[in-house]
Every structure is written in C-alpha cells, then in structure tokens.
Amino acid sequence: MSDTFGGGAALSEHNAAIVQRVVEEIWNGGELGLADDLVASDYVNHYGLISDLVRGPEAIKVSVALYRAAFPDFQITAHHLIAQGETVALCWTAWNPRSDGRAAIASRTTRGDLTGMTFCRLVEGKIAESWTSWDTAGVLRQIGVLPPERVADGGTG
C-alpha cells in the first residue's frame, strides 16, 4: 500500500495521532468543529450505543455535545493506542469524576468508570469507520440496575 506519509510506519503514526486528537480535543476538550477535519463525511459507527446511526462529523458533534451536557466533567483516558496502517485500536476508560445531578445516571454515583475498546479505520487522514465495545454490565452495576458482581469466595465485589 502506498501512502503520502512515506511508508507504513509513518502512516500508522499519523493515523494514531488523529485518533488521539479526536479523544483529547473533541471528546475531552469539546472542540466540536474539529470533527469536520478529523472525521470523514461518510463516517459510520458500526457498533456502540447507537450503532449505525452515528454518521458523519455532524453526528459526532451531537454525540459529544450530549455526553458533555449530561456529564460536564466527562473525560476519556487512552490506555493503549495501537496503529497498523489504516487501522487504529484504542483501549480506553471514560469517567465522570463527580456528579452534579445533571443526569439520572450521573446522580447515582460520584464517579462512574466505563471501560471499552474502539477500532477505527482511517482513509485519507480522516476516521471513516469505527467499532466500539464497552462494559455495559459494569455501568449497569454502577447505577444499581444490576446487582453487584459476585466474587469467587461468595462475597460481593
């Protein structure tokens, strides 16, 4: 595969940097206008909370705005960012450090953590597709919808 960045390693680094910018600047920083530069016009999220309905940069802007309205202190921490060519894998934790009662879920916990993984495919320097999987059961336990997970010794954890 030929690329404009001088080889596979350079393309991988460039694509990883784009995904990192989306996390840091759009999701964490609220710079919604950057979605036009970093997300393809025909972008689609194939898996996640609203699978296949998040399409294009405008949908990213709406998604981020909704999360940030519900959880104003919401942050994503990237633990692993691995890129190979046009594919970038990201392991992350999203968390809300405190609750101010703005959302029903946020009002039930002082700090909510959500772990997940996102795989992105980039084309010409923009995210074209993503697949996200996150710990749904863990969130439901945190907000009291599911009972606490049982540990091996029979206690609760």
Image: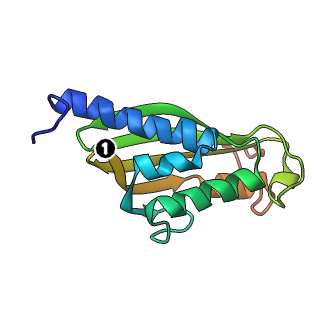
Count of all numbered marks drawn on residues in the image: 1
Query: Looking at the image, is 145 positioned above or below residue 4?
Result: below
- The reply to whether residue 148 is in sight is no
Q: Where is residue 37 drawn, in percent x and y?
A: 42, 47
Lateral position of residue 65 relative to residue 124, left or right: right
Residue drawn at (10%, 40%), measured in percent from left and top? 2
Residue drawn at (17%, 36%), measured in percent from left and top? 4
Query: Looking at the image, is 82 positioned above or below residue 146?
Result: above
Secondary structure of the residue carrying tag 1 is loop
Q: Decide which of 123, 45 is in the foreground and name it.
A: 123
Give the residue furthest to the bottom: 53
Residue receiving disc 1: 125
Lateral position of residue 155 relative to residue 10, left or right: right
Residue drawn at (69%, 41%), measured in percent from left and top? 95
Residue drawn at (45%, 70%), measured in percent from left and top? 52
- Looking at the rendering, which quadrant does residue 16 occupy? top left
Which part of the image, by quadrant, shows the N terminus?
top left
Amino acid type at mark 1 = Gly
Lateral position of residue 61 relative to residue 46, left or right: right
Q: How many neighbours does mark 1 have within 10 angstroms: few (below 14), some (14-19), or many (20 or more)?
A: some
Q: Decide which of 50, 110 is in the foreground and name it.
A: 50
